[in-house]
Structures are given as structure tokens and as C-alpha cells.
Image: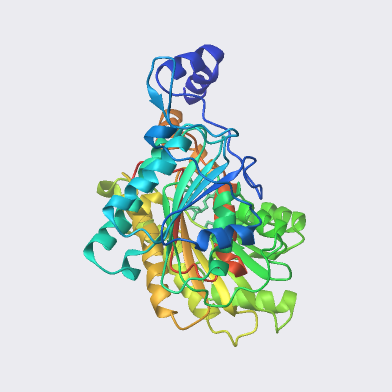
């Protein structure tokens, strides 16, 4: 039945019916380490200035933004005044609103945004930089900081053609060099499926040295669990592209496909059930054996996860426990062992830990109490570790994928799958590589000021915040 329905809806006639019902063909997204093709317009609002420095470091020469002011409008054929049009469609609009403190100044954002709302190239970008509410004084300034958040989220929902909107919030003391990895990521195709997100950037825990590199993990060991297939395999491939030495981990039953991934990436495979009590020790021992006793893990990516969906009315203690153990408790036990930096093969003192949450953890999902508990728990863990490791140079972050096209989501009935795909601002499911790119960005040595964040990779899913 699922196959029949899918066949009808993807046939030429079915496509026409779907388009009439408002289900337009989803736009093709720009992916990879690729900057926008069109110019990047920079609006430096009063009190701003840091964005110009950051764009310079990223290697982008910005153009002046157009302003939607009465004198700049032209009438269309029906005599309706239209905002000014760029000669060449811009690939991005960057708004430096770091000095905006007054309600009246929000009008300046409207002026620069209106000309790009229908004028950006496909897969374009709106990136707003602002100062976080904790770093500004006065009621109006704090309210305005949140007001900018509302503008960004709405712009993300109104943009077309696969364009995205994101807000970068600067903590006190942030320098341009702390923002380069975030700005490169957001401008490039690596952030294709990330929209409607707020990124908090603080001063780097480890000072950022040198220019941004496209091989940031050269000679660094990265461990990825659940890497035999799906998102885990994509994460491993992305780190390999960026120069890492991979250790891929999965259960013995997935040994054959795990070995294939390891061979393809010239990495090493570790067959291990991460719920084993000695899993952390076995990962460290493996790293020390393969890469030498002095080697340390640069990034530990806790990707392995399972679902065992049942309505709570039918959920027994075994099914409950299995999900919480794989998705949350195992990650905690492994971290505890690897944070002993003196242990051969443990985490580097300035290393990275990343957990995989889920939008089900933000919003809850029918039939997934156990899964939502575990994934919301991953977020709680990330936030708690930020405080716990505040004095360490280790960063801990999470990603919360929305609907991603994998074997796991391939089992969802077609109509439900199509609803999940369409209920985000980009009208499509994400690809495993979209999650992988976000994780690689978080683990970049230059992302040292990004700590304790959970970034949603969901195309601005309508569910949850
Ligand atoms: P998948 O089911 O395709 O792959 C998961 C991998 O983890 C498998 O290779 C499996 O063998 C491995 N694994 C499971 N239990 C393990 C254990 N005890 N020890 C070692 N390895 C184990 O799943 P997918 O879709 O690639 O998801 C990856 C992660 O992303 C999971 O944490 C999942 O919860 C999360 N996620 C996925 C979403 C999606 O739309 N696909 C949405 C939100 C989160």
C-alpha cells in the first residue's frame, strides 16, 4: 500500500495534484564547502562593526545592502510600490545588529530585509549577528535582543527557494576570530538544512590560530559510534574528507558493514556494544593500540541510538530501559572514562564531545516516551557538562536532527513520512550529511567558543522551538 501511494504521488499526474494541494516540489539545496554564488550584502547597523572583520577573515568582500525606503521604491505594473531590487541576486545578507539596543532601531532590520525576501539566490542566507541579552543592560535592550530572535525565526519561515535564516548571539568579549568558523559554516552549503537557529558564541576556550582550514582534523583521531550505516557512516565520511583518522564503532552484528566503512575511510573498526560496562575503557585501549599510547581522541561523537516505539500504555520496563541505556546512559559512562585525560587513548584536554539528541526530545512525540526521555536527556547532559567543564578546554555540544532520510526513518509509513518531510521551512527531509556537517563544524578546532549548544538540524521544523 505504501509503495502504491508513493508511486501515485511521485507520478507526473500525482505531482500536479500535489502542487495544487500546496505541496510544491522541494527546492534543491546547495551543499558542501561552497560559498554562495552571488554577492554577500553586509548591513552594519549603528554600533556594529565586527561582521566586516569576520567576513574579511572568511575571504568574502561584501557589497552595500539596499534599503527599503519610500524614495527607493518603484511601482510594479499594477502601481504597487515595490522594494528596490539588487542588480545581481545576493547569495546572502549579513546583518550586524550587535549594537542595536532600541525598539525603534528594529526598523533598520526591516529596511535591509525587505529587498532580499524575494530577491535572494536559491539556497541563500540571512545571517543576523546580535549581542545576547545577558551581555546588554536595560529592559529595552534585553527586550530588543529577544525581538531580533523573533525576526530571524519569522524570516526563516518566509524565505523561499531553500534559503535559510540564522541568528548568531555574541557573548561578552567575543573577537572576530572566534566567529570565523560559525560564519563560514552558515554561509557555506554545509549548513543547508539548518535554519531558524540561534548560535551562542563565547570567547574561544583555546585561542584560534591561523586561517580557517578545509582539513581541520588533519592527524586528529575521531571516534564515531553507530558508524556502520545511516547518519553515523555519513559523520565518519565527513570527518575523513576533513582529514581525520577515524575509529568507527558499532555492534558485532553490524561488523561487516562496519568493516566496509572503516576500509573505505582507511580507519579502524571496533566492534563493541556501547552498553557494555567497560565500553569506555575498550575505546581508549583501541585508540592507544592503533595510534600509540600518546594518542588522544580529538572528538568523541556519540551517534549510536535506537528507537523502540510504543504508546506508554503498552510500554514495559525492558523496552523502556533498552532505549535509555543505549541513547543516554552509555554515553555518560563512556565520557566518564574518556575524561581521564592521562589515560592512554582517552580524550584530548582540548577535545570535543558531541551527543545526538532529536526534535522528539524538544517537543515530545506520540509513542516515543522512552526515546524522548533519552534524547531530552542528551540535551540536559550537554548543558550540564558545559557548567561542569567550564574550567576545562573540552567543549560539549549536541545536534538535534529533525526528519533525516535514513533506514530508520524509511520504516515510517509513507503518508506520515511525507508529513514529516513537509512540515519544515525547507519542505523536505534532511540528508545524513547535513547532520554530519554540523557535527564536524562543532568539532572544528576553530569552534572553541561554541560550547554547551544543541543545534537543531531540522530545516526549521514547525514542531518545538
Ligand atoms: P540507524 O538505525 O540507521 O543507525 C544507528 C546505528 O547505531 C546502527 O548502525 C546500529 O547498529 C548502531 N547501534 C545501535 N545500538 C548500538 C549499540 N548498543 N552499540 C553500538 N552501536 C549501536 O539510525 P540513524 O537514523 O542513522 O540515527 C543515528 C542517530 O541519530 C541516532 O542516535 C538517532 O536516534 C538520531 N536521530 C536520527 C533521526 C533521523 O531522522 N534518522 C532524527 C533524530 C535523531
Residue at coordinates 39% horizontally, 50% vertically from top-left? 359
Q: Is residue 215 above or below residue 157?
A: below
User: Please, which residue is most extreme toward the bottom here?
Assistant: 342
Q: Is residue 149 left or right of residue 275?
A: left
Whether residue 170 is visible: yes
Q: In this view, does 87 lie to the left or right of 23?
A: right
Q: Which residue is at the front of the view, 109 or 406?
A: 109
Q: In which quarter of the image is residue 45?
A: bottom left
Residue at coordinates 52% horizontally, 44% vertically from top-left? 125
User: Please, which residue is most extreme toward the front here?
Assistant: 71
Whether residue 464 is visible: no
Q: In this view, does 115 lie above or below 41?
A: above
Q: Is residue 398 above or below residue 108?
A: below
Please name the colour scheme applied to the rendered image: rainbow
Q: List x then y, in percent, for residue 46.
A: 41, 58
User: Please, which residue is most extreme toward the top here?
Assistant: 13
Q: In which quarter of the image is residue 113?
A: top left
Q: List x then y, in percent, for residue 135.
A: 35, 70
Q: Quadrant of residue 209?
A: bottom right
Residue at coordinates 52% horizontally, 11% vertically from top-left? 13
Q: In this view, does 294 lie to the left or right of 348?
A: right
Q: List x then y, in percent, for residue 414.
A: 46, 29
Q: Is residue 118 above or below residue 93?
A: above
Q: In this view, does 213 lie to the left or right of 442?
A: right
Q: Which residue is at the front of the view, 343 or 47?
A: 47
Amino acid at each position: 500500500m505504501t509503495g502504491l501511494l508513493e508511486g501515485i504521488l511521485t507520478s507526473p499526474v500525482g505531482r500536479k495534484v500535489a502542487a495544487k494541494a500546496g505541496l510544491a516540489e522541494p527546492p534543491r539545496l546547495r551543499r558542501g564547502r561552497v560559498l554562495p554564488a552571488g554577492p554577500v550584502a553586509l548591513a552594519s547597523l549603528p554600533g556594529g562593526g565586527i561582521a566586516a572583520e569576520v567576513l574579511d577573515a572568511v575571504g568574502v568582500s561584501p557589497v552595500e545592502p539596499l534599503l527599503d525606503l519610500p524614495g527607493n521604491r518603484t511601482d510594479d505594473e499594477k502601481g504597487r510600490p515595490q522594494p528596490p531590487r539588487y542588480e545581481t541576486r545576493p547569495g546572502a545578507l549579513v546583518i550586524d545588529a550587535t549594537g542595536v539596543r532600541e525598539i525603534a532601531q528594529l526598523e533598520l532590520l526591516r529596511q535591509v530585509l525587505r529587498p532580499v525576501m524575494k530577491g535572494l539566490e536559491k539556497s541563500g542566507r540571512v545571517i543576523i549577528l546580535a549581542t545576547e541579552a545577558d551581555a546588554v543592560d536595560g529592559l529595552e535592550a534585553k527586550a530588543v535582543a529577544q525581538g531580533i530572535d523573533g525576526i530571524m525565526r519569522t524570516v526563516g519561515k518566509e524565505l523561499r527557494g531553500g534559503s535559510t535564516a540564522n541568528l548568531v548571539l555574541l557573548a561578552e568579549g567575543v573577537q572576530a576570530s572566534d566567529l570565523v568558523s560559525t560564519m563560514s559554516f552558515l554561509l557555506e552549503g554545509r549548513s543547508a538544512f539548518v535554519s531558524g537557529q540561534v548560535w551562542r558564541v563565547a570567547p574561544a576556550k583555546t585561542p584560534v590560530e591561523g586561517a580557517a582550514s578545509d582539513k581541520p582534523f588533519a592527524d586528529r583521531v575521531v571516534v564515531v559510534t553507530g558508524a556502520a550505516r545511516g547518519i553515523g557512516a555519513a559523520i565518519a565520511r565527513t570527518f575523513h574528507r576533513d582529514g581525520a583518522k577515524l575509529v568507527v564503532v558499532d555492534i558485532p552484528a553490524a561488523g561487516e558493514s562496519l568493516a566496509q566503512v572503516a576500509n573505505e575511510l582507511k580507519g579502524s573498526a571496533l566492534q563493541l556494544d556501547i552498553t557494555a560496562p567497560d565500553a569506555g575503557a575498550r575505546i581508549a585501549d583501541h585508540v592507544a593500540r592503533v595510534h600509540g599510547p600518546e594518542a588522544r581522541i580529538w572528538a568523541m561523537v556519540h551517534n549510536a541510538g535506537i528507537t523502540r516505539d510504543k504508546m506508554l500504555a503498552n510500554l514495559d520496563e525492558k523496552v523502556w530501559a533498552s532505549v535509555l541505556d543505549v541513547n543516554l546512559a552509555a554515553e555518560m559512562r563512556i565520557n566518564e572514562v574518556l575524561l581521564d585525560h592521562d589515560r592512554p587513548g582517552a580524550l584530548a584536554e582540548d577535545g570535543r564531545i558531541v551527543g545526538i539528541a532529536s526534535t522528539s526530545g524538544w517537543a515530545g512525540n506520540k509513542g516515543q516516551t522512552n526515546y524522548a526521555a533519552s534524547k531530552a536527556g542528551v540535551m540536559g547532559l550537554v548543558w550540564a557538562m558545559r557548567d561542569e567543564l567550564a574550567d576545562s578546554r573540552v567543549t560539549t555540544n549536541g545536534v538535534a536532527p529533525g526528519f533525516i532520510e535514513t533506514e530508520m526513518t524509511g520504516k515510517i509509513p509513507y503518508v506520515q513520512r511525507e508529513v514529516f518531510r513537509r512540515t519544515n521551512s525547507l519542505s523536505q527531509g534532511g540528508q545524513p550529511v547535513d547532520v554530519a556537517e554540523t557535527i564536524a563544524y562543532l568539532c572544528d578546532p576553530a569552534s572553541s567558543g561554541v560550547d554547551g549548544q544543541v543545534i537543531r538540524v531540522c530545516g526549521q521544523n514547525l514542531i518545538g522551538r
